Structures are given as structure tokens and as C-alpha cells.
Image (spheres, rainbow, N blue to C red):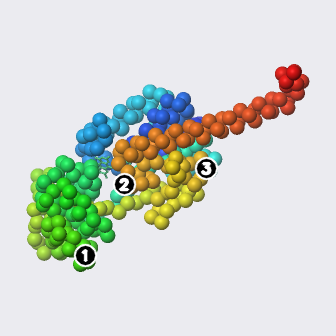
Amino acid sequence: METHNEMYDVVIVGGGAAGLSAALVLGRARRRVLVIDGGAPRNAPAAHMQGFLSRDGMPPAELLAAGRAEVTGYGVEIADDHVQTIEPGFIVRLAGGRVSIARRILVATGVGDELPDIAGVRERWGKDLLHCPYCHGWEVRDEPLGVLGTHPMSVLHAQLVRQWSADVTYFVHTNDLNASEQAQLEARDIRIVRGEVARLVIDDDHLTGVELTDGQVIPRTAVFIRPGNLPHPDGLLAGLGCELDAAGFVTVDATWQTSTPGVWAAGNVVDPRAQVITSAGAGSAAAIAINADLVQDDVARAMRHHDTAKVASPAASAATND
Ligand SMILES: Cc1cc2nc3c(=O)[nH]c(=O)nc-3n(C[C@H](O)[C@H](O)[C@H](O)COP(=O)(O)OP(=O)(O)OC[C@H]3O[C@@H](n4cnc5c(N)ncnc54)[C@H](O)[C@@H]3O)c2cc1C
């Protein structure tokens, strides 16, 4: 097993939109940067990425390939590997055996989506089983849409999806409605279907309907869910002592710095609602803050060196002061 002990100004964990945008800024700031990426960005199941100004509709993998080419052009190194642990100091250990030392850390590892255990959901995720109307709503506008009641926020999600189509069916599934939710759905002509959902009906690689456990099939061409989100499952930030909020997400200041000095976090790992463009923006802003922090550290180091040189050679320093 190969082992390096290389020193970097910044190690970035995660090479999605947030991590690569940070790498671009730091590479252009002439910092020595390593990006370590596990190669599983959140939107990989989707064929197209929407809502990124000037890149609307681009395949997600194309954006990342372009980003990788840009950052390596500024000398940033990319390791296709998985970070297992980060120890204070910072010592970064990779699954492949490599060990790197970093002055600063940026964690941009994204977030996991918790999907309901309904037949067809995993297979159609990012295709016609969708979660984000801002990402996919336009593409299915005016179609017969469904929303599955799998989450406490599902009713609100149905009200949001209604913005894109007048034909929305809310499947109560296991998430009972209260009187006010029912009235609000009815007020906006959202059809309510009671009964447990058994599976998504797929025909010729397209979703065609939602089947209930009693066998009834309601034709739909796309279905939305509100997934739960799994914050940073590898526990890297918690391991570094970073403060987490009640939902388990890391807390950051306005510059995306965590409560642990020297550790920043950006993108979906901080906010599961962040889009690609906002994750990229967060990565960029974090990188500027990290570079400013490194400059302060560079000044402190230079002053220490300067003072030591004066103590070592008092005559020279006295001559200079004349
Ligand atoms: C199906 C779907 C479709 C979407 N469509 C859109 C869309 O059209 N438009 C839009 O704006 N947003 C869309 N999104 C949201 C989008 O995916 C996120 O906004 C974006 O991916 C967040 O970027 P990120 O850099 O924070 O995380 P990610 O893109 O998820 O990147 C995180 C990277 O970190 C790596 N990683 C994780 N842990 C480790 C580790 N321990 N060591 C090394 N590497 C690690 C992962 O492998 C991954 O490559 C969609 C989401 C989903 C689920």
C-alpha cells in the first residue's frame, strides 16, 4: 500500500460543485491544494442539471469534468479516493492508504437522501421520481403529477409542486392528513387519494402510474417526494469536534467556518437545500476566507522568523536600526 506524507495548504474533502469551486479559487491564489473525491455527487442519477446560469441543462458529470480540468490547470491535485479520518493538526487518512497533512480543511462531502421503501422509488430516482421542483418542475410542467405522503412536510411539498401543474394528486400513503391540510389541498384542486402506495408502475423505462395496495392504479407521469436528509454520514466533522445543529448538520459562520478553528464546510453538507449554483458559491466564499486565514498565519510565521533572526544576530539588527 502506497503511503505519502505530503503537506498541503488546504485539503478539500469532496469534489462536487462546492469542493471544486473552492479548489479553483485556492489554486488561482497559488495555494497547494489537494481535493479528495469519492466520485458520488448527489445529482448523479439525473441526466441534466437545471437552474445553473449559463449551464442550464448540462449533464452533471460534464460540469464536474470541466471543473476538474480547470482546477488541475492551476496545479490543484485530485485524488479519487475516500477520506476515512481527519485528525487534529490536520492529518487526513485516505482509504487507499495515503496520508496528507493540511494547514486548513474544507469539508464539502454533500448530503445523503433517505428514500422511502416503496418498489420502484430507487430505480426511478432522479428520472421521474423527483424531489426538487426547482430542478425538474419545468420539465414536467402541466403533466399529471403525484406527491407521496412519506414525510411530515409532504403536504407542503404538494402545494409547491402545484405551481408547476394543475393536475396534482396527493397520495396520503402513511402520512395522515389533518383537517387544515385537507382543506388547503382541496382549496387548490389537489386530488387526495387515500390508501397505502404499493409501487410505482413502470412501462418501457417510464413511470406511468402509482399502484395502491388494493390494486388501484392512478396514472401519473412523474411523482415527487420530500426525502429525509442524512447529514455527513462519515462523521468527519463531528470527529473534528465541530458543532452540529439539532438535525445533525454542521453549524458555520458567515464565511462557512465551523466552530473548530481551521475547518470550513460548504455546500449540501451544511445545507441540504443548496442547489448546485449555491453550493458552488459557498465553496468559492469559503475558499476566500480560508486564503485570508492562511495569509494571517503566513504573517505570524514570518514575524516569528524575523524576530528569531534578530535575536540570533543582534549586531546586524543594531546596525540596521542606526
Ligand atoms: C436527483 C437529484 C437531482 C438534482 N438536480 C439538480 C439540478 O437540476 N439543479 C441543481 O441546482 N441541483 C440539483 N440537485 C442538487 C445538487 O445535487 C446539489 O445541490 C449539489 O450536488 C451539492 O453540491 P456539493 O458539492 O455540496 O455535494 P455533491 O455534489 O454531492 O458532492 C460531494 C462529493 O463529496 C464526495 N465525498 C463524500 N464523502 C467523501 C469522503 N469521505 N471522502 C471523499 N469524498 C467524499 C462525494 O463522493 C461527492 O463526489 C439535485 C439533487 C438530486 C438528488
Residue occupied by mark 1: 180
Q: Is mark 3 within 8 Å of ligand 1?
A: no
Task: Name the amino acid, label 3.
Answer: Pro
Q: Nearer the viewer, residue 94 or 106?
A: 106
Q: Give the mark nearest the N terminus, 3 or 2.
A: 3
Can see residue 82?
no
| Label 3, label 2: how far apart the Cα atoms are | 25 Å
Image-based side of 279 in relation to 292, left or right: left
Image-based side of 136 in relation to 220, left or right: right
- Residue 62 spot, x, y in % from top left: 31, 36
The quadrant in which residue 142 appears is bottom left
Q: Give the mark nearest the N terminus, 1 or 3.
A: 1
Residue occupied by mark 2: 273
Task: Name the amino acid, label 2.
Answer: Arg
Task: Name the amino acid, label 1.
Answer: Ser
| Label 2, label 1: how far apart the Cα atoms are | 26 Å
What crowding class fits label 2: few (fewer than 14 Cα within 10 Å), some (14-19), or many (20 or more)? some
Q: Are marks 2 and 1 in contact (CB under 8 Å)?
A: no
Element at label 2: loop
Q: Are marks 3 and 2 in contact (CB under 8 Å)?
A: no
Q: Nearer the viewer, mark 1 or mark 3?
A: 1
